[in-house]
Amino acid sequence: MIEVIDLKKAFGSNNVLNGITETINEGEIVAVIGPSGSGKSTFLRCLNCLEDPTSGSIIFEGKDLADMKVDINLSRRHIGMVFQQFNLFNNKTVLQNICMAPVYIANSDLRKVKRTNRKNKFLNLFRKKKVEMLEITAEKKQIKLEAEANAMRLLKRIGLEDKANAYPSTLSGGQKQRIAIIRALAMNPKVMLFDEPTSALDPEMVGEVLDLIKAVAEDGMTMVIVTHEMGFAREVANRVFFMDEGIILEQGTPDEVFNHPINQRLKDFLSKVI
Amino acid sequence: MGVKWQVFYDKFITKEAWRTVVDGLWATIEIAVLGLIIGIIIGTVIAMIKMIPKYKTAPKVFSAICDVYVGFFRGTPIISQLLIGYYVLMPALGLNINNVTVAIIVFGMNSGAYISEIMRSGMQSVDPGQLEAARALGLGYWVSMLKVVIPQGIKNILPTLGNEFIALIKETSVVSMIAVVDLTKAFRQIGDSSYEYIIPYTILAAVYLVIVFIISRGIKLLERRLAKVDRSH
Ligand SMILES: Nc1ncnc2c1ncn2[C@@H]1O[C@H](COP(=O)(O)OP(=O)(O)OP(=O)(O)O)[C@@H](O)[C@H]1O
Ligand SMILES: [Mg+2]
């Protein structure tokens, strides 16, 4: 699903990622753990190029995202991301938060199809072999209605359909994060990235968010989760990466990493956090 | 005083100078409002160009052009910009535009330079996570800015923008340099033709005060409305 090849990232003279090569397979749930400042967030943010890699490749759907010529916006449609600080759009209602990107993207695709059709209709006048018109599956109005229906379905799933017209500032942290997760889901992503999704939450709200992530995982979503919740990593992940000083120092199944760590630094880390 | 009032009354009502005053008021408002709108558009575009991460899409050239633009309009007096626009550029380009339009364009371009700085600080006051979240959903830089960052940024700078508008209203009083009859010019004509200045100039100042007061109230109301949007429901 995502193939990372010799990924390096430096901020100025600070080498944060020092050559990471890993493949994240379809359906896999990868937990990334490691001490603070080891480069976990940077690694995750390189996967969808929120940080541009200094060198190396990120192969997703046959394209190298690190290549500046690749249209990163097209790839990002299929890579959902959930942030520690939720980052719901403050100027939009919950429903607008969820619908904005799908609606905008569908509309801009629709405009592109129509433009192509107009061009071909004209050029067909001069062509011997006529070019077929592209099919238009939904008009503007319908796009919006479908997106809203989908958003309401997702809201119902998390029991927040009555918050559809509320603004983010009126919600609790747990509600915000769950909405941020379904906002990402509304794009039908092929993979989802989570950067410490529960670290900014009050303890009593951690559970509801973890439960939702678990439910999404059970639906077969491919996921990369940076987390400090070792219990959660152990329970949900198929594979655990231990990062230290910009490399993946050790990786394996949760059983291997948590119960039979090999590297001394991993052992030290685990003894501190568990 | 009685005599002076009589002189003013003759001029204002009997000789219908009020018509010029109304036209002048209209010119002042037209120049300030349209200038502000043009200024906001130009300022927003400049601010967005200046905020594109440099190493990537944005050719540094655009950014440099913006610097020259802002430098010129902030570094020269508005009067000289008006004079150059009307007496130098227009004939040179062979254009035939009326002087009010020239004033609107010059004031728009001028306030664009100032607003670009205001706008930039407004956008910088928006949490970078907002832009990141929009980009992570696959939206492009410009769409993300327009739909998410700018609406929040504008809210933060509304008071400053209001001040810019007020400054603009007052600054438009120099447009008589290119023969526009604005509010100030209209009252000056009354004074000049009757040799009686006290009353027309006092009223002139009062009219500006009233306009500025109305704008300030309007901005306050708008701020309160927008603040409510976040909290209601
Ligand atoms: N935008 C940035 N500019 C400069 N340096 C950065 C930037 N982002 C991260 N760094 C640096 O990169 C290093 C790794 O940061 P990163 O956020 O990836 O660590 P982390 O493993 O996620 O830590 P934490 O557990 O605290 O979130 C840190 O030293 C940090 O200062
Ligand atoms: Mg981090």
Image (spheres, coloured by chain):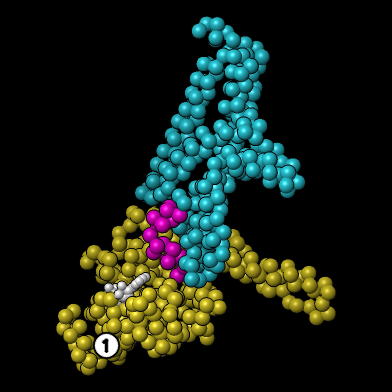
Chain colours: A yellow, B cyan
Q: Chain of mark 1?
A: A
- Name the amino acid type tagged 1: Pro
Q: Secondary structure at mark 1?
A: helix
Instruction: Answer above or below: position of A267 versus B216.
Output: below
Residue in the image at 50% along x and 39% along y: B165
Left or right, A270 with reference to B131? left
Depicted B193 relative to depicted A192: above or below: above
- Residue A59 is situated, as x and y percent measured from the top left of the image, at 48, 85
Q: Main secondary structure of the magenta part?
A: helix
Is residue B123 in the magenta section?
yes
Identity of the residue drawn at 32% across and 68% down: A84
Residue B172 x, y percent position in the rendering: 56, 35
Q: In the depicted view, which residue is nearer to us: B115 or B67?
A: B67
Q: Which residues are magenta?
A: B120-137
B212 shown above or below B15: below
Q: Position of residue B5 (x, y in %)?
A: 55, 10
Relative vertical location of residue A264 with respect to residue A95 in this rendering, above or below = below
Q: Residues within 10 Å of mark 1 (few under 14, many from 20)?
A: many
Q: Where on the picture, by quarter, is residue A248?
A: bottom left
Q: Position of residue B19 (x, y in %)?
A: 65, 22
Q: Determine if residue B152 is in view.
A: no
Front residue of this view, candidates A129 and B65: B65
Magenta stretch holds residue B66: no
Residue A203 visible to an observer of this rendering? yes
Q: Give the residue at x 39% y 55%.
A: B125
Q: Quadrant of residue A217?
A: bottom left
Q: Which residue is mark 1?
A: A254
* B96, A98: nearer the viewer: B96
